[in-house]
Image: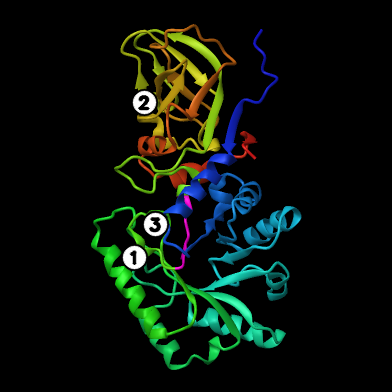
Amino acid sequence: MNDYSGPLSLLEIHLDRITRNYLSLQKRLIRGADCAAVVKADAYGLGATMVAPELYKANCRHFYVAHATEGVAVRKALNENLGKASIYVLHGAQGLQPQEFLQNELIPVLNSLGDIEQWSAVAKETGKKLSAILHIDTGMNRLGLSGAEVERLKNNLAPLKPLDVRYIMSHLACADEPAHPKNKEQLEKFKKLTAYLGLPCRLSLANSSGIFLGNDYHFDQARPGCSLYGINPTPGVENPVQDVITLKTRILQIRDVPAGETVGYSATYKASSPVKLATISVGYADGILRCIGASGLVTIGGQKCPIVGRVSMDTIIVDVTAVEIPLRAGEFAEIIGPHQTIDEVAAQAGTIGYEILTSLGKRYKRIYTGQ
């Protein structure tokens, strides 16, 4: 009998590789520039309360989250084990009462004139000069003050007087395409608008890919996210960062299927010759996107094997006919790891590594190594 007492799926997160990625990015920055860490979406699905303390040990002192509740979790993780760090909330002072925001020492990113007025009012009520980041839009058209709003603010800086504006930031739209003219346009607009405001604060523009656009984009702080977690920030050339996860899951069953038989829902796959198939314990409920069925690969016995038929909620079916070594139920198949990177899996699904990472489900047994 096969031993199924262990977990069906394992997600190993190599914390030491995340740390090495952070340190390598820090070394690329111009002298004096800080390297922050974006740990939003639970550190891209890998566990912010585990990742942030390790990055703190590597001298990271600036962390970005999207929601205030994410910031509370990171603050608790850092306070329990380490010292003080700055935690910035990209969606502003939303999602918590002002008092909770202050108790957890969260710093909002102010994306509009309304955000500035709101946080300024909180500062006046508390009688304290509250920290904030000012976000100006330079062409992303997602969040941040428009050029017109920057001009209005310049003409009336009073709402900023109760605030300690730590940084002015913007976000690059096309940094992963070095030759895209949008990069230069945003850089020039960022320099123009920040000079126009004339505030005595530091500047932040570069994301992961922006770091590799050169020193002109580094300013005083860079905000890498995807590159910390092994996603290539320089598509088309060799990945300058290390992969940080190994994802593997068990074979549930192996069967021989004769020619002419169909496989999976809607019978989208039909065997043209006799095949040996393995049913694997992972599906779209676990972040294996349904669209990957026609082109996805899984490594079994050192051999890359194609997914056949449609991805189900809890299973995929893989053609293991070409695997030369004997296989049996209970053995592991590699989804992401030494034989296949997260970017390769994303390409098979027609998406990006971000979506793959943040879609990984809750059923994997997570193992953290390299602490």
Q: Position of residue 220 (x, y in %)?
A: 46, 68
Return the disc, 1 or 2, that comes first in the chain's sequence.
Answer: 1
Q: Position of residue 3 (x, y in %)?
A: 67, 14
Examine the structure image and report whether residue 223 is included in the region drawn in magenta: yes
Q: Residues within 10 Å of mark 2 (few under 14, many from 20)?
A: few
Q: Eyeballing the image, is 298 above or below 54?
A: above
Question: Residue 351: which quarter of the image?
Answer: top left
Name the residue beneath numbered marker 1: 216
What element does badge 3 sit on? helix
Colour style of the rendered protein structure? rainbow
Depth check, front residue: 315 or 45: 45
Apparent side of residue 43 relative to residue 204 in the rendered image (left or right): right
Name the residue beneath numbered marker 3: 211
Q: Residues within 10 Å of mark 3 (few under 14, many from 20)?
A: many
Q: Position of residue 218 (x, y in %)?
A: 40, 63
- In the picture as drawn, the residue positioned furthest to the right comes out as 80
Q: Position of residue 7 (x, y in %)?
A: 66, 26
Name the residue beneath numbered marker 2: 268
- In the picture as drawn, the residue positioned furthest to the front comes out as 31
What element does badge 2 sit on? loop
